[in-house]
Image: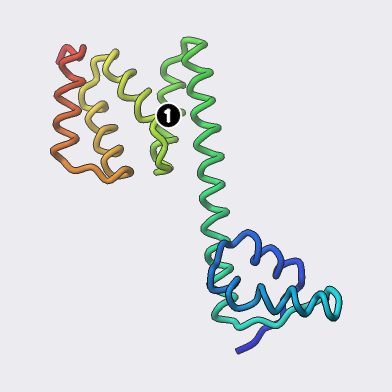
């Protein structure tokens, strides 16, 4: 089935969706037609390919939102640590690891903060969450836990 979309959406999908199927189907013909006939107001595209490109674009935009929120929460945690407000720093970093974005800063800071507080249970929980996000196995979690526990947790 064919659907008409605006030239603005077409260009956004062509440039930002990184959808190979969309580019392969329309890029060459579109630019050739545009050179011959000028820029159209609408473009006709196959709905299956359109839906695929829209889905890929949404995934990319979601990834950007997660990265932005991860950076914001990391910066907030750093700010609170500098101010000496460890509880607020922990809260910001905990929110961060719950997002599930594969960035290590919040995991490392939580591990360090919980180790300093002597909180083995939370340190192990953070290591398990790290393993979920980064694809590590239980042996890795146990090895890291034992390594960090020796570095300073009294329990």
Q: Position of residue 92 (x, y in %)?
A: 46, 28
Q: Name which residue lies at 69% across and 79% down.
A: 29
Given residues 62 and 33, the one toward you in this image is: 33
Instruction: Give the vertical position of 38 relative to 74 (above or below).
Output: below
The quarter of the picture where the N terminus appears is: bottom right
**Quarter of image, res 4:** bottom right
At 53% from the left and 25% from the top, the residue drawn is 76
Q: Is residue 18 left or right of residue 88?
A: right
* Left or right of residue 94: residue 41: right
Q: Nearer the viewer, residue 36 or 17?
A: 36
Q: Residues within 10 Å of mark 1 (few under 14, many from 20)?
A: many
Image coordinates for residue 36, horizontal then vertical, percent: 83, 80
x, y percentage for residue 140?
Answer: 18, 36
Quadrant where the image shows the C terminus: top left
Residue at the location (58% across, 74% down)? 24
Q: Which residue is mark 1?
A: 93
């Amino acid at each position: 089935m064919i659907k008409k979309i605006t030239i603005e959406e077409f260009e956004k999908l062509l440039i930002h969706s990184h959808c190979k199927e969309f580019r392969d189907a329309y890029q060459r013909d579109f630019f050739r037609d545009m050179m011959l006939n000028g820029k159209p107001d609408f473009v006709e595209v196959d709905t299956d390919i359109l839906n695929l490109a829209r889905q890929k674009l949404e995934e990319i935009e979601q990834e950007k939102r997660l990265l932005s929120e991860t950076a914001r929460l990391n910066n907030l945690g750093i700010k609170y640590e500098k101010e000496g407000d460890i509880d607020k720093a922990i809260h910001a970093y905990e929110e961060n690891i719950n997002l599930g974005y594969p960035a290590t800063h919040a995991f490392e800071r939580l591990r360090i903060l919980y180790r300093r507080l002597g909180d083995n249970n939370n340190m192990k929980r953070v290591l398990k969450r790290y393993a979920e996000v980064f694809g590590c196995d239980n042996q890795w979690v146990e090895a890291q836990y034992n390594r960090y526990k020796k570095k300073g947790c009294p329990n």
